[in-house]
Amino acid sequence: MKSRYSQIFPVLFLLTLLACQTNKRQYTSKPSKSLVNPDSDLLEVNAVAYHLNDSVTSVFLEIMNENLIYRRLDTGIAFYAEVRVSYRLMLERNSSKIIDSASFTLNDKADETVDIKSIRSRFKVKAKYGRNYFLDIEVLDFHKKTKYTKGLNIYKLNNFSGQNFLVTSDKKVSFRNNFLSGDLLEIETMNQNVSKVTVDCYFKNFPIALPPFSSKDQDEFKYKPDSTFTINLTSGSFQLVMPPRGFYHLKANPVSNEGVSLLTFDKTFPGVSDSEEMIECTRYIMNKSEFDECRAATNKKEAIDKFWIDLGGSIERAKELLKRYYGRVKEANKYYTSYTQGWKSDRGMIFVVFGPPTNIYKNNKSEIWVYGVETSTNAVRFVFNKTQNPFSDNDYVLERSQFFKDAWYNAVDTWRQGQVYLDRSR
């Protein structure tokens, strides 16, 4: 007779498979929520800046269609999605002075079934060298009547930023900086002053975020690489093969830390790769003995299955819990990855345990996440400060406080009682 714990494995495998084969799913009608993560109805918008010269920057745009609404516009069989893209180039976020702006419309056609795919576009902005900028991108889904925003920092203070490099994979512009071991990348630059590229190699396995009330200092990231090599440019492009693990940091100036980082992750990223990683990212709601027991288990799949079934009280309940929990892990990896996986970051930790915040406020230096009614004394506010990290423009550190202890344990206890933690006050 099969163990009841083995019955949950097909669901775990399905979630992992969905994470790496999203583009193969089809629907006869579009869902309003993500099937992998029911907490998310966000439209995934990605953007990459690439400096063409001292006054013009090209912006490559990608819109994932998973949460777009497709509708029939006539009696035919075709379905259509329509979005309007608007952008404003400013000196800084929320500035009243606009340097450049425009808008345009994108359409996508589908038959009875809608393949999950990306809609790509490109536009140019007038950004001169000598200072940095902020690009505010707004995407309006005409059918859903919903707006989404994407912010992109444009770094043109000097010629050394990572935006002087354009990374392509399989002859397509890459909107992510994570790849598979052995992937061959084509990297180009329009900067005529770059004749040599320094590549710093980092192979450290970074720890997960500490609890929001922890008084312990997080391990300091040392900038010293594990190894270094150089590439001489005979033209404006070169090729690079990704390492088995860790990441490369490419620099146009060997004495500066500015550059672009390229990371090696598993093929299922942003999803969870295997039972071992499932155990690692479930540490936020495990006690130490549970975590140690799962890590030491000979059969790690059976150990993590048992953990979820014990929490849920039944296989069906466990399926729902793990679907929501690892769905949040995937979302955290999408939006909060820096030089390590997003679920390991401070924002990723809060997102995985607490879910999407009620409100988010952003400026150039920080993000404030609010859970609950803002005027209520029970509202919880997490402040994340942006760090000056040469390896990532997406690294934020939480202002930790003992004040968060009750809120944290309340959220963790909810999970441990077999319930998905959600902000009930919204």
Image (spheres, rainbow, N blue to C red):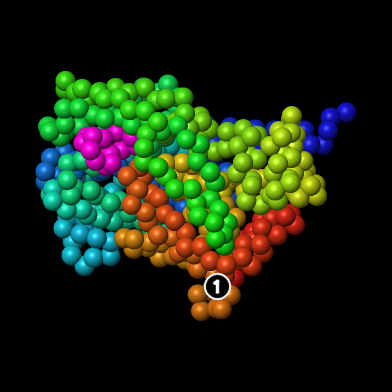
Query: Which residue is nearer to you in this view: 82 or 241?
Result: 241
Residue 396 at least partly seen = yes
Query: Which residue is nearer to you in this view: 289 or 243?
Result: 289
Residue 354 occupies which quadrant of the picture?
Answer: bottom right
Magenta stretch bounds:
247-262
In the displayed structure image, the side of residue 74 where residue 99 appears, left or right: left
Total residue callouts = 1
Q: Is residue 69 above or below residue 240?
A: below
In the rendered image, which residue does mark 1 sit on?
Answer: 379
**Residue 268: x and y, percent?**
53, 32
Residue drawn at point x = 70 percent, y = 48 percent: 288
Q: Is residue 415 magenta?
A: no
Q: Quadrant of the N terminus?
A: top right
How many C-alpha atoms fall within 10 Å of the one at disc 1: few (<14), some, or many (≥20)?
some
- In the image, what residue type sits under mark 1? Ala
Q: Quadrant of the C terminus?
A: bottom right
